[in-house]
Amino acid sequence: MDPHEWGLSTTAIHAGRKHNGTRSVTTPIFQTSVFELKENAEGAEFAAAVEPPQFYTRWGNPNFSEVQAVVASLEKAERALITSSGMSAFATVFETFLKPGDHVVAPAAIYLGTEQLLRRWETQKGLRITWVQNTLDAAEWEAAVTDGTRLIFAETPSNPTLSITDLAMVADLGRRRGVRTVADNTFATPIFTRPVELGIDLSVSSATKYLGGHSDLVAGVIAGSEADIAACWGTTKITGPTVDPFSAWLLHRGLKTLCLRVRRAADNAQSLAAWLLWQSQVVRVDYPGNREHPGHAVAARQMTGGFGAMLSFELAGGLAAGQRFCEALSVITRAVSLGGVESLIQHPASMSHLRTPPEVKARLGISDGLLRFSVGIEDEADLKADLEAGFQAAGLAR
Ligand SMILES: *Cc1c(COP(=O)(O)O)cnc(C)c1O
């Protein structure tokens, strides 16, 4: 059977399979910085090659090749590249495709690290940025593009307010204006959204989250065309955000259960999001799977088989209630990050955004009672019971 016709589960398990000279069913960990050369000529050949897997680990490694083959297949992209973190993946894309003075279009509410990276480019390299406020407004994206625009960046669903961007619309805009398009696919994962299939040039993810899935590694991936990924590799070869072979091996192992994990987590999220909507203590729920979500129609079109497992909800009672709520939880763990098998909760107002000025929080949609909930794969009844305990402690029980 042609591997291109495999479903996503089969792809996740078998796409990277190479025996690498052994008959082990799982791949050994190539915990080495360097490989012996058969002859001098091989050294010359590898030195000139794009990503030789058995030369020097900053250039490539068999454990990287396997992960890259799986991610490229899942993302329906020609090629993929693994890096040391999600942030180094984004830094690599910007370093590869942007020059000082270029113009970029990006949503106003995105992952804080990506925003800070863009702002650093702005102050240090004169990058000009137009921030899109309403990601559902095609006219706003259209008007933001200028003759100097070199990159359009999207993140869908976005962090932490789960706003939605129509990737096919962004891809079309990029094609018409000759601008490269990039999507952060961390929240959706290739199981629910494949940006490259929708016409986006580069799909970039923090593999630390769902792709790894067990909160035990830090890595990033970039997927796109042969030429674009070769160009990104050219950057990493000299800037060196190299992941370690063991983390790549863990990521490969995590990817095999990606379908099962994210579908189960999304089922939990869909059901909890509907339940939260009916709780009198909850004033707002942001989940693209809810019909009430402004991006629901677009999400229903571009997300296949589920709406992901990230949701945000706002408690009546603001800052103090949010804090007491988190303290009463026993299954759902208080931590930043997301996308693991375990449910994690974050209260931005008292944690990540405590020192963020109020006007910035308002722009980002971060209210005092907002909780960001990464729904895991636990039993749904236990998650509900835990949330109920939280409501009780926050003094919000009916
Ligand atoms: C975590 C995250 C990143 C950064 O990835 P790291 O692996 O932490 O470097 C980027 N974008 C989104 C949406 C994230 O959640």
Image (tube, rainbow, N blue to C red):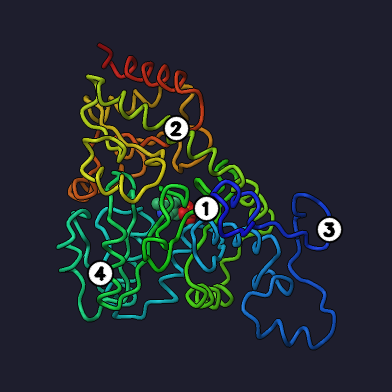
Of mark 2 and mark 1, the one earlier in the sequence is: 1
Residue situated in front as seen by the camera: 155 or 353: 155
Q: In the structure shown, which secondary structural element does the residue marked by tag 3 occupy?
A: loop
The residue type indicated by label 4 comes to: Leu
The disc label shown at residue 22, or none: 3
Q: Are marks 4 and 2 in contact (CB under 8 Å)?
A: no
Kindly report which numbered mark, 2 or 1, lies closer to the viewer in this rendering: 1
Q: CA distance from mark 2 to mark 3?
A: 42 Å
The disc label shown at residue 173, or none: 4
Residue situated in front as seen by the camera: 238 or 161: 161
Characterize the local packing of mark 3: few (<14), some (14-19) or many (20 or more) Cα atoms within 10 angstroms. Answer: few
The residue type indicated by label 3 comes to: Thr
Of mark 4 and mark 2, the one earlier in the sequence is: 4
- Residue at the outermost front position: 1
Kindly report which numbered mark, 1 or 3, lies closer to the viewer in this rendering: 3
Q: Are marks 2 and 1 in contact (CB under 8 Å)?
A: no
Characterize the local packing of mark 1: few (<14), some (14-19) or many (20 or more) Cα atoms within 10 angstroms. Answer: many
In the rendered view, does 286 fall on the left or right side of 226? left
Q: Is mark 1 within 8 Å of ligand 1?
A: yes
Of mark 2 and mark 3, the one earlier in the sequence is: 3
Characterize the local packing of mark 2: few (<14), some (14-19) or many (20 or more) Cα atoms within 10 angstroms. Answer: some
The disc label shown at residue 334, or none: 2
Kindly report which numbered mark, 4 or 1, lies closer to the viewer in this rendering: 4
Of mark 4 and mark 1, the one earlier in the sequence is: 4
The residue type indicated by label 1 comes to: Ala
Of mark 4 and mark 3, the one earlier in the sequence is: 3
Q: In the structure shown, which secondary structural element does the residue marked by tag 1 occupy?
A: loop
Q: In the structure shown, which secondary structural element does the residue marked by tag 2 occupy?
A: strand
Q: Position of residue 193 (x, y in %)?
A: 41, 52
The residue type indicated by label 2 comes to: Arg
Please give the residue where the numbered disc 1 appears in the rendered image.
207
